[in-house]
Amino acid sequence: MTRNNSQGNMLDKAMTVLDCYQPDGGAFRLTEIASRAGLAKTTAFRLCSDLVRLGLLDRDGDTYRLGGKLFELGSLVPRRFQLREAALPFLQDLFEATHETVHLGIREGREVAYVERIHGHQALSLPSRIGGRLPLTCTGVGKALLAFSGEELIEEVLAQPLPRLTPHSVTDPVRLRTAIEQIQVFGLAYEEQEAVLGVCCIASPVFDGSTAVAALSVAVPRARFRSAQLAPAVRTAALGLSRALRSGG
Amino acid sequence: MTRNNSQGNMLDKAMTVLDCYQPDGGAFRLTEIASRAGLAKTTAFRLCSDLVRLGLLDRDGDTYRLGGKLFELGSLVPRRFQLREAALPFLQDLFEATHETVHLGIREGREVAYVERIHGHQALSLPSRIGGRLPLTCTGVGKALLAFSGEELIEEVLAQPLPRLTPHSVTDPVRLRTAIEQIQVFGLAYEEQEAVLGVCCIASPVFDGSTAVAALSVAVPRARFRSAQLAPAVRTAALGLSRALRSGG
DNA sequence: AAAATATGTTCCATGACACGGAACAACAGC
DNA sequence: GCTGTTGTTCCGTGTCATGGAACATATTTT
């Protein structure tokens, strides 16, 4: 006992505490935080008090939640913030044309990081969440990004076992390779129930030169999926955003 | 010299560093961070290295920017996240009805904290920013929140000098009091160039019972401002969201 | 009612580690 | 060349984070 297993400085421990909230931003009691973070109760108490004082944690009775300061700082992260600002009008156009769930994502390592997600009243239950990440190979946005991120990344991804979110996820490197070539030719990425059963997706990359800096997509319930109607809307939105980024700087 | 003016523990210093990025999420060099945060160069270096390792800061050559981890965590802040999720469909409706800039905000102390802001291609240059804050008394969303946050807060706000963002900002407590009473009667808050010259705004509170948990608004260039057209759209969106929150839990 | 088991909180001696000055390395520019 | 920047490493000093023990309070068990 009394082991300080999570070695590191005070900052590391603070992050360990904040990382407890990863899947959903729930509410935790002090003891729960201490055990999850592998800290002594006293240490967790002092740490949480500090975090509350700084606004990184909110205290509500006996439970702690993520604090408003984090939201404040998170909104300032430049790549996300600037991209969102430039993209929003085009995402709105796309939503208005389709009234389906619209995504905007960027590549971060071998994953998609979702920057924006807008939807109407019929909210699909999707694993994609603003600020969340998914494998590049199981999502429309991800495949669109992958296809235009350079050959070396593609080979790097293909060399490793491909993750499987549903039975429809593409796990055969050969099939994925041909899919990528299709995407490179047409500038559109299709995804059918590879991330969530019952949901299809069509995505298009946003270019800066010849590499993709982002991608946007429309996710549609399988029953309503009509690629002939969606594809032009997605493409024009992506091209419009590409053009806006080029002229905007 | 060599003074440790920013007393406090390591966490405090880390926050001081992150707070350097407040107005815009710019990029800073190490020396700049050190001087802004009042830290010795060595300390700033070690701190920034730690922050980069944790993903709270991104290093790009010789400059540091806010890191993706902050965005990730910020998106999980529960009050913001859940409210946004519930509100988005109604904000979309409102945008589609007006094609003007739409805001969603909550009260945080004596300020509005903006949770969402959507706009089309004609982007107004506004001080409201997602994650940003403004005085309650200078904005439509703020006044809508203030009017339904209980009498004691109103008196507290009226007792202090009222901030002035433009020459049109209401700084007379008596005038503000009557404005608040109007808002309480009609459930709509008007704001004309009180936050930004040339921009008017009409807002409506989102209720949980008899107190406002949020407010949404439409901001319109003065030339296009037609309250008869906007008011019903804003009101129906706010009422719809109130109803959705009540039934949703 | 007492005992038991939770919770969050305060106190404090100890020692790990954050601190910042000095020194170094790699540039840029009068 | 020298003098001004940067960012970076090293290291002795002393601070402050640490976690065990003890306390307070509530809820549950005996």
Image (cartoon, coloured by chain):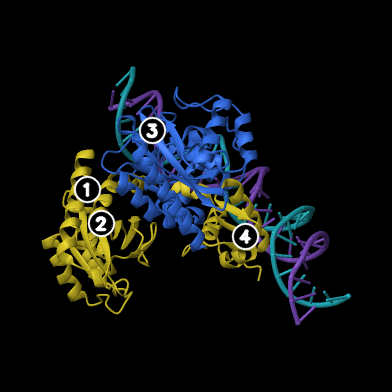
Chain colours: A blue, B yellow, C purple, D cyan
Image side of residue A162 versus residue B230, left or right:
right
Chain that bears disc 3: A
Residue B214 visible in this rendered orientation of the protein: no
| Residue at (55, 24) in percent of width and height | A172
Whether marks 4 and 1 lie on the same chain: yes
Q: Residue at x 40, y 45 (%)?
A: A234
Residue receiving disc 3: A200
Q: Quadrant of residue B170?
A: bottom left
Chain where mark 1 sits: B
Q: Nearer the viewer, residue B99 or A182?
A: A182
Q: Which residue is mark 4?
A: B63
* Residue displayed at 61% across by 54% down: B59
Q: Chain of mark 2?
A: B
Query: For the C terminus of chain B, which image quadrant?
Result: top left
Q: Is residue B31 left or right of residue B90?
A: right
Q: Secondary structure at mark 1?
A: helix
Which residue is labeled 2 in the image? B216
Q: Are marks 1 and 3 in contact (CB under 8 Å)?
A: no
